[in-house]
Image (cartoon, helix red, strand yellow):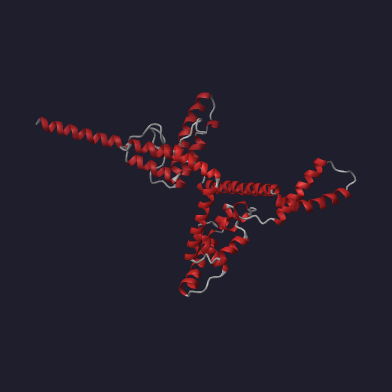
Amino acid sequence: MLCYKHLFIILLTCLVTVVLGHDHLLEGIYCGKENCYEVLGVTRQATKNEIGKSYRQLARKFHPDLRRGEEAKKEAEEKFKEIATAYEILRDDEARSDYDYMLDNPQEYYAHYYRYYRRRMAPKVDVRIVVAVTITVISIIQYYSAWSKYDSAIKYFMTVPKYRNRALDIAKDETKESQGKGKNKKSKAELKEEQDRIIRRVIEENMDIKGAYAKPEIKDILWIQLIMLPYTITYYIYWYVRWLWNYTILKKPYGDEEKLYLIRKYMQLGQHQFNALEDSERQSFLDKELWIKENFTVWKDIKEEETKKSLAENNKYKQYRRYIKSHGIGRMTFDDS
């Protein structure tokens, strides 16, 4: 008999816990201890229009500006905040879905807090805007970085005697002409500055700088590349199918463009790196028929042997090898130097 009493008490306790747990509302999230639906005076089946209509009616009714006296204003403000909070939750589909889930599953205590604060802390900015701004910033940095590299290349060529002297001959004629036209003679500093400007312009007009230090173009920045991506993919597919059809199936002879592509592929060079080579050097690759794999392998072995030989004859490299032989790698002290 006692066991039946205990069993009845346990079952009754569980039943009360489940009933009370279903109505249990968590402090600090959503509408706190108040039910958001009850705050707005609507049911869980209410539509967005019904929720919005109820909110506008209650907002007008409890607006603090319609109250007189500090106490009445304070009470209205609290009620107005409750109404606004409830409306903010129930007007958003995802927030309302999370809230309904909490009402139906009160036992998942920590999960409700996680869902609520994850939504509250999530960035409000549209992801598309973030992506667009990021791509824009990268494109700007990329463009100015390319200009910086190009400027460095021009400054370097201005110091190379071969190019500077050639440009200097043109610059001298132009500076003399401009000095003769002017009423006042220019100082040496002004003449030097003008001369450097002319040398730079002559080099920019006559030098064909290729590779990573080439003059930047708008089409190279990330934004334009992304816009052109569908065309790029389509062109690549067309190029690959054409290559497969012409040179694999039909066995047509290679043109110079195709030969250079194979040579670049064997050398494992990027397009910019290969373009940076002198025209005469690329022509020598064609003359040696390096697009043929066997020829390229022989040429590569010869180049490696020449490199090893030149290193072996280099005094600095000899000193380095003697040091490594005596002391090993990664060990150097003041006494060794």
User: Position of 59 compared to 221: left or right?
Assistant: left
Quick check: can you spot residue 274?
A: yes
Q: Residue furthest top?
A: 70
97 or 53: nearer the viewer: 97
Q: Is 221 or 47 nearer to us in this picture?
A: 221
- Residue 310 lies, in percent from the top left, at 54, 51
| Residue that appears at 55% across and 62% down | 231
Image height of 58 relative to 258, above or below? above
Horizontally, residue 32 falls left or right of residue 124, namely left
Q: Where residue 115 sits in the image (x, y, percent)?
A: 39, 40
The x and y percentages for residue 221 are 59, 52
Q: Quadrant of the N terminus?
A: top left
Q: Does the image show residue 87?
A: no
Q: Position of residue 136 (x, y in %)?
A: 58, 48
Is 240 in front, or is 320? Answer: 320
- Number of numbered callouts drawn: 0
Q: Which residue sits at x=50%, y=69%?
A: 243
Tell me which corner region of the image, top left, top right, bottom left or bottom right, holds residue 33.
top left
